[in-house]
């Protein structure tokens, strides 16, 4: 070492005075561990890598025992020259030493100089420590990576590629040999068939051990997935997962019933089979898009039910290959976009007991073979453009639920066909072109009938006298026909009746007071007929479960009865176009808190609008025009959801003063204005079976409200 180096090192050493200020006078050595603790990095630091070999900043002497150098509690101690010394007991007394705080300065300086490291030790400390550098470690990693990429991984990838190519070839040959796929389909990488092969060749699931039947099943369901745009399904239902195809399903909770069910691929074990197979394909409301693949025919040995309704993106015609599903007894495709005609094989090839094709785009004649399917129990072909004769339905001797509304069915109902429908529970031929009169046996032969909807046809003649013989009917809709005669008193025997609509016919006579016995009625529409003048029968006050009451244009007169306030569950009250006089009972505002729609227009009511109407906070529509009401109409202006409010708040054509003042009315009329608010305001329920024949929205015959009102 040169003299200049020595001087540089010595210049960096602390002086005796500096050292004395940092060293306890009782110390006999420098504690390197205390120095280490002050600069050791935080172990929580993300860049910190602990090194167990670097416990000390300064390395111990070469001849230090490993256990002793670790700072053990016993044994000899060493100074920095490697010389052992005994640990001082710290007993400073007058016989051996001076006072603890009085040291001979010359002795202090000598002790401190003895403990300072030499120049050689300082150089040794600064010399690079043994061991690999960071660069060398990175080099090791890089060389290892190169070794893996060149030597290890390529053979593995080649093996995997060979396995993939081999498996793909095996699957392709299998499908081609068994004529399960066409070469043109497999050559097109965008086809569902080619995608299915690609999946089967690459999936982790060991499908090579599957039997032919199970492999075909897996292929078919994979084609179904890609043919119906599986990646964009609402629920994936574990399709294409690495488990048996029978595990491709998910659990769902019914929001209404709370019942937990599974949907997707549902398997059971067919009679005589050793393994489970697909018995039900259940995927309603799952955003399926595309066409039904013909590959479903390969499930002919097991598939019994196919329920994929409420998927409006599922389009195209019914593939003719479905006729090979010889065990299929339930097919539901309602609310899709199925086009074309109903194929004949629906009746000749399939053992159908349930067929649902409602709300599609089907046209043409209903094949006679389907209507000769005597095992059919449920047939829903409503809301299409199908033609046929109602007489052809007479052979359906086991039919229980028949939904044919909104088609082009013609013909007449006869007692002969009714004799075959003894099992019928629900029948809906509404909004077709059925003519003739109602058969006399309509309410006697079908003893199990609960729902009968024939509204919107061309039926004429009187209501049968036997109408009261069936006390099981809960829903009867005959509006918008040409029925004549009086309402039979015997109708009061229909004690379970909840829905009765006879409006917009040519019925005469008077409204029977006996209808007050139908205590379960919730919906009563009797208006727009040719009744004799009468007051509203007081016996109707017993119908306290009513939610909707419409007796408009019914030649009613007299006072508006206060007992209407008994209908505390009423949501709609329509007494439009009658001859009611007197004032509006204030009890209506006090009790009808659930009222959504109130139509008292086109009567002869006088007085003021009751202040209690401010309590009708659910009101959405209020029609009071073409009466003789006076005063202010602002009593209801604070109702938040009142969207259509009409009164006689308009000045006359010859500057006559307005009959009533209103600052919030949506429309103002005047008694002399014969064109103001002259709409029918029909709000009859056009029921559908999908909603259980219950109201879910109010839709008026004219579109004056910004948005039709949902129930409740």
Image: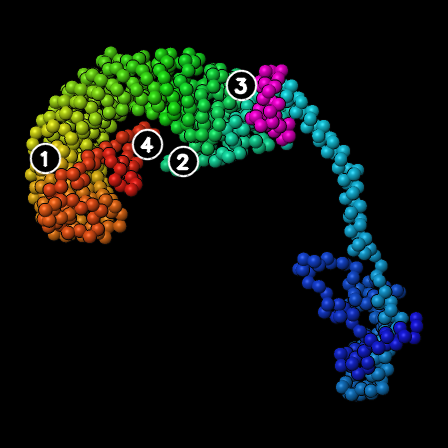
Q: First in sequence, mark 4 or 1: give its number.
A: 1
Tell me where residue 712 sits by quadrant.
top left
**Mark pair 4, 3: CA separation:** 35 Å
Asked if residue 694 is positioned above or below residue 340 in the image, the reply reads below
- Please tell me the numbered disc located at residue 254: 2
Badge 3 element: helix
**Mark pair 3, 2: CA separation:** 31 Å
Q: Nearer the viewer, mark 4 or mark 1?
A: 1
Q: Residues within 10 Å of mark 3 (few under 14, many from 20)?
A: many
Asked if residue 404 is positioned above or below residue 76 in the image, the reply reads above
Q: Which residue is mark 4?
A: 691
| Residue in the foreground of this view, choosing between 649 and 604 | 649
Give the residue displayed 47% in from the left and 30% down from the top.
288
Badge 2 element: loop
Is 2 displayed left or right of 219 in the figure? right
Q: Which residue is mark 3?
A: 298
The magenta span reads 176-203
Please check the rendered image and state whether residue 200 is part of the magenta-colored stretch, yes or no: yes
Is 257 displayed left or right of 663 in the figure? right
Q: First in sequence, mark 2 or 1: give its number.
A: 2
Specify the principal SS of the magenta part. Answer: helix
**Mark pair 4, 1: CA separation:** 33 Å
Q: Which residue is mark 1?
A: 556
């Amino acid at each position: 070492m040169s003299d200049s180096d020595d001087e540089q090192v010595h210049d960096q050493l602390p002086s005796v005075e500096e050292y004395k200020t940092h060293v306890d006078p009782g110390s006999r050595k420098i504690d390197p561990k205390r120095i280490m603790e002050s600069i050791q990095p935080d172990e929580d630091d993300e860049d910190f890598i602990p090194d167990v070999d670097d416990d000390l900043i300064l390395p111990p002497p070469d001849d230090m025992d490993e256990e002793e150098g670790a700072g053990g509690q016993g044994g000899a101690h060493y100074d920095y020259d490697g010389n052992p010394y005994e640990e001082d007991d710290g007993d400073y007394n007058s016989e051996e030493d001076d006072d603890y705080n009085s040291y001979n300065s010359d002795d202090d300086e000598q002790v401190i100089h003895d403990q300072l490291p030499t120049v050689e030790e300082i150089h040794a400390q600064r010399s690079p420590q043994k061991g690999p550098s960071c660069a060398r470690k990175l080099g090791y990693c890089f060389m290892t990576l190169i070794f893996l990429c060149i030597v290890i991984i390529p053979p593995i990838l080649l093996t995997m590629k060979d396995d993939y190519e081999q498996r793909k070839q095996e699957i392709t040959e299998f499908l081609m040999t068994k004529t399960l796929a066409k070469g043109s389909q497999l050559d097109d990488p965008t086809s569902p068939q080619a995608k299915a092969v690609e999946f089967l060749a690459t999936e982790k699931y060991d499908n090579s051990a599957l039997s032919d039947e199970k492999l075909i099943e897996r292929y078919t369901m994979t084609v179904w997935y890609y043919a119906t745009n599986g990646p964009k399904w609402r629920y994936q239902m574990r399709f294409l997962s690495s488990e048996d195809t029978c595990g491709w399903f998910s659990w769902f909770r019914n929001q209404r019933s709370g019942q937990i069910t599974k949907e997707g691929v549902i398997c059971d074990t067919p009679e005589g089979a050793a393994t489970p197979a697909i018995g039900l394909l259940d995927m309603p409301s799952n955003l399926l898009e595309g066409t039904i693949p013909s590959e479903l025919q390969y499930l002919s040995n097991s598939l019994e039910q196919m329920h994929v309704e409420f998927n409006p993106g599922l389009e195209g015609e019914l593939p003719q290959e479905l006729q090979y599903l010889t065990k299929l007894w339930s097919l539901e495709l309602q609310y899709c976009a199925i086009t074309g005609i109903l194929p004949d094989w629906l009746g000749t090839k399939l053992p159908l007991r349930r067929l649902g094709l409602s709300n599609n785009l089907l046209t043409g004649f209903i094949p006679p073979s389907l209507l000769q399917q005597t095992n059919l129990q449920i047939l829903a072909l409503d809301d299409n453009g199908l033609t046929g004769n109602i007489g052809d339905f007479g052979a359906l001797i086991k039919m229980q639920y028949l939904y044919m509304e909104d088609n082009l069915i013609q013909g007449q109902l006869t007692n002969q066909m009714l004799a075959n429908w003894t099992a019928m529970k629900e029948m809906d031929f509404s909004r077709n072109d059925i003519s003739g009169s109602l058969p006399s046996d309509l309410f006697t032969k079908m003893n199990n009938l609960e729902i009968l909807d024939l509204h919107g046809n061309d039926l004429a003649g009187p209501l049968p006298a036997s109408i009261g013989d069936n006390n099981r009917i809960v829903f009867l809709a005959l509006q918008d026909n040409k029925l004549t005669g009086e309402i039979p008193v015997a109708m009061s025997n229909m004690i379970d009746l909840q829905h009765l609509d006879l409006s917009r016919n040519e019925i005469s006579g008077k409204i029977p007071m006996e209808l007050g016995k139908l205590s379960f009625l919730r919906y009563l529409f009797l208006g727009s007929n040719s009744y004799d003048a009468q007051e509203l029968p007081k016996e109707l006050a017993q119908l306290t479960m009513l939610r909707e009451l419409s007796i408009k244009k019914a030649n009613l007169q007299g006072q508006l009865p206060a007992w209407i306030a008994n209908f505390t569950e009423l949501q709609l009250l329509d007494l439009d176009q009658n001859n009611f006089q007197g004032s509006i009972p204030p009890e209506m505002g006090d009790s009808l808190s659930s009222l959504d729609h109130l139509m008292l227009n086109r009567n002869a009511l006088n007085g003021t609008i009751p202040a209690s109407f401010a309590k009708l906070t659910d009101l959405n529509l209020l029609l009071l025009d073409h009466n003789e009401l006076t005063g202010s109409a602002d009593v209801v202006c604070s109702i938040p959801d009142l969207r259509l409010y009409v009164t006689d708040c308009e000045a006359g054509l010859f500057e006559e003063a307005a009959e009533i003042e209103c600052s919030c009315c949506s429309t103002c009329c005047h008694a002399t204005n014969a064109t103001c608010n002259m709409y029918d305001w029909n709000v009859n329920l056009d029921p559908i079976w999908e909603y259980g024949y219950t109201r879910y929205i109010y839709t008026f015959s004219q579109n004056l409200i910004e948005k039709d009102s949902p129930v409740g």
